[in-house]
Amino acid sequence: MFEQLLLALEANEDGVRTRSDPEQLHDFRVAVRRTRSVVRLARRHLPGDMARMWEPEWAWLAGVTGKPRDLDVLLEQIMVTTQSLPPETKSGIDEVIEHVETMRADSGVKLTKALAGDRYGTLKRGWRVAVLELGSNKGPAGGSATKLAGDLTRRANKQLLRRLDVVSSASSPEQIHDLRKRTKRARYASELFGSQAAKRAGTIVKRSKRLQDELGEFQDSDVQRRLVAQLVERNPDLSDDARRAAQLLIDSFEKRHRRARCRLDGQLARYRATITDG
């Protein structure tokens, strides 16, 4: 499992470095997130200092890939949003896009340097050694693979249920974002261990993905609003057309954010029912 995730990471490295396809950065980040999720869920089953030593390094890698991915998604959303804006906003939108593309290029350079650096190289080499040692010891401690798979999926869903009980449409963006991370963790556990765990794993994956997408709408619109607001604040030389276009984008993102918040209670109630029935 860990080895497969590491191979998926490496398969997308060249695309991340060359920025030839935004989806390769997405797939790279998915491999990182899945690795982090399994490490957190299986911490008590892992030998020695494996989790303590490498978890901070995986968190670092998630951090350095976050900004480039946010800007990729922002560019995609600007293209979608401009379809509903008046034609006279085009020149201003084009200027905003040019600035976002510059931000993306700058973040891409930093990411490329990070992937070429010693820290990333050490992470891959050290993690591969730890995974090989784990395999030579016949996997994590704690019983059969079936028992372990069931334990990890139950733990992920238990953690998610606890978070569902305290999050509502009135919660802060940080609390809702944390719920999204818990939802991803539950989904990843079911995807990775579903064949060995509960028969309902397929249903959990489908419904977790749906909730994750809805929570993503809330999170992404908030991130996009803040990124465009920062762009305006940090570029005093923007033309008046670009400033007007940026404000239209911010207004659109804020509307999406409010709509997502209004839908949240119903979505959480429906999801809670699907994973607690039966």
Image (spheres, helix red, strand yellow):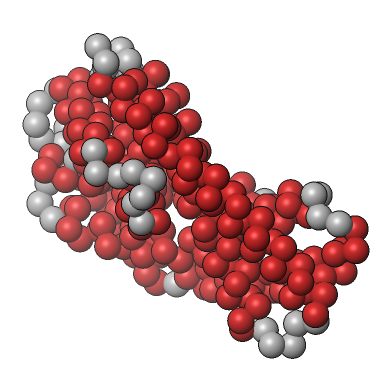
Determine the image quadrant of residue 225.
bottom right
- Image height of 175 relative to 2, above or below: below
Horizontal relation, residue 249 to residue 85: left or right: left
Residue 228's image quarter?
bottom right
Which residue is the extreme one toward the right?
88
Residue 44 in sight from this viewpoint: yes
Where is residue 246? Give x, y as percent.
71, 69
Residue drawn at x 90%, y 58% is: 87
Is residue 77 left or right of 17 when viewed as pictured? right
In this view, 185 is above or below 15 = above
Could one spot residue 27 in this view of the protein? no
Q: Of residues 259 and 194, which is closer to you in this image?
A: 259
Please state if 83 lies on the left or on the right of 249 as rendered.
Answer: right
Q: Position of residue 117 (x, y in %)?
A: 45, 72
- Extreme-bottom residue of the structure: 237
Q: Residue at x 19, y 53 (%)?
A: 51
Q: Nearer the viewer, residue 200 or 226?
A: 226
> Residue at coordinates 42% horizontally, 25% vertically from top-left?
207
Quarter of the image that includes the C terminus = top left
**Residue nearer the viewer, 11 or 39:** 39
Q: Residue at x 87, y 63 (%)?
A: 90
Image quadrant occupied by the N terminus:
top left
